[in-house]
Image: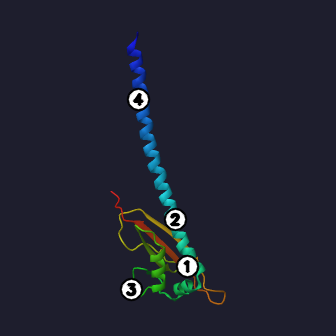
């Protein structure tokens, strides 16, 4: 009986099983990170759309100073409260109100992955005062 042939077959089978195991772990991690990214983006858009559709919050945007952020003193408390209420656990989000011409960039140095979304709000047909409303969200994990 040729035992060496069976041993080679078992070794090859075990090598294939190990490679497939590593592939499944890598693919599983990649898919879960993509799902997390999608959830953050959906939440960002939900926050912005909520502000856009709520007349009280929308008016607070037009009363706020231009080029201000939710981290600044004097930012409308109603918008801060809404942002805190809608921010998922483990995320830090900042809301910025800017003019259309402003680049509206994040003012802090953060070493994590940052997700941003923006919308443009127009007051009404009688007065022209558009505002850019931008949200930046990032997690607590630090990138290496």
Residue at x 35%, y 59% (from the top left corner): 143
For the residues labelled 3 and 2, the Cα–Cα distance comes to 27 Å
Q: Secondary structure at mark 2?
A: helix
Q: Nearer the viewer, residue 27 or 2?
A: 2
Mark with earlier residue (3, 2): 2
Q: Secondary structure at mark 1?
A: helix
Residue at x 44%, y 76% (from the top left corner): 84
Mark with earlier residue (2, 4): 4
Where is 33 relative to 9, above or below?
A: below
For the residues labelled 2 and 4, the Cα–Cα distance comes to 41 Å
Q: Position of residue 24 (x, y in %)?
A: 46, 42
Residue that badge 2 annotates = 41
For the residues labelled 1 and 2, the Cα–Cα distance comes to 16 Å
Mark 1 neighbour class, 10 Å CA radius: few under 14, some 14 to 19, many 20 or more: many
Q: Quadrant of residue 22?
A: top left
Mark with earlier residue (1, 3): 1
Mark with earlier residue (1, 2): 2
Residue that badge 1 annotates = 51
Query: Which circle, 4 or 3, is nearer the viewer?
Result: 4
Q: Position of residue 121 (x, y in %)?
A: 58, 80
Q: Dividing the image into 4 quarters, which one contains the N terminus?
A: top left
Query: Which circle, 1 or 3, is nearer the viewer?
Result: 1
* Left or right of residue 74, residue 144 in this image: left
Q: Nearer the viewer, residue 27 or 60?
A: 27
Mark with earlier residue (1, 4): 4
Residue that badge 4 annotates = 14
Specify the label residue 73 is tagged with: 3
Say whether marks 2 and 4 touch (CB < 8 Å).
no
In the image, farthest residue toward the front: 1
For the residues labelled 1 and 4, the Cα–Cα distance comes to 56 Å
Residue at x 47%, y 53% (from the top left corner): 32
Residue at x 51%, y 65% (from the top left corner): 41
């Amino acid at each position: 009986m040729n035992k060496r042939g069976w041993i080679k077959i078992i070794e090859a089978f075990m090598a294939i099983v190990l490679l497939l195991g590593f592939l499944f772990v890598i693919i599983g991690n990649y898919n879960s990170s993509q799902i997390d990214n999608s959830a953050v983006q959906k939440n960002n858009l939900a926050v912005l759309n909520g502000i856009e559709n709520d007349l009280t919050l929308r008016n607070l945007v037009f009363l706020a100073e231009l080029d201000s952020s939710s981290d600044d003193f004097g930012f409308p408390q109603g918008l801060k409260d809404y942002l805190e209420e809608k921010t998922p656990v483990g995320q830090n989000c900042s809301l910025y109100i800017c003019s259309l011409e402003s680049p509206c960039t994040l003012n802090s140095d953060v070493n994590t992955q940052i997700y941003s979304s923006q919308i443009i709000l127009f007051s009404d047909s009688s007065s022209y005062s558009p505002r850019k409303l931008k949200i930046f969200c990032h997690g607590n994990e630090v990138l290496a």
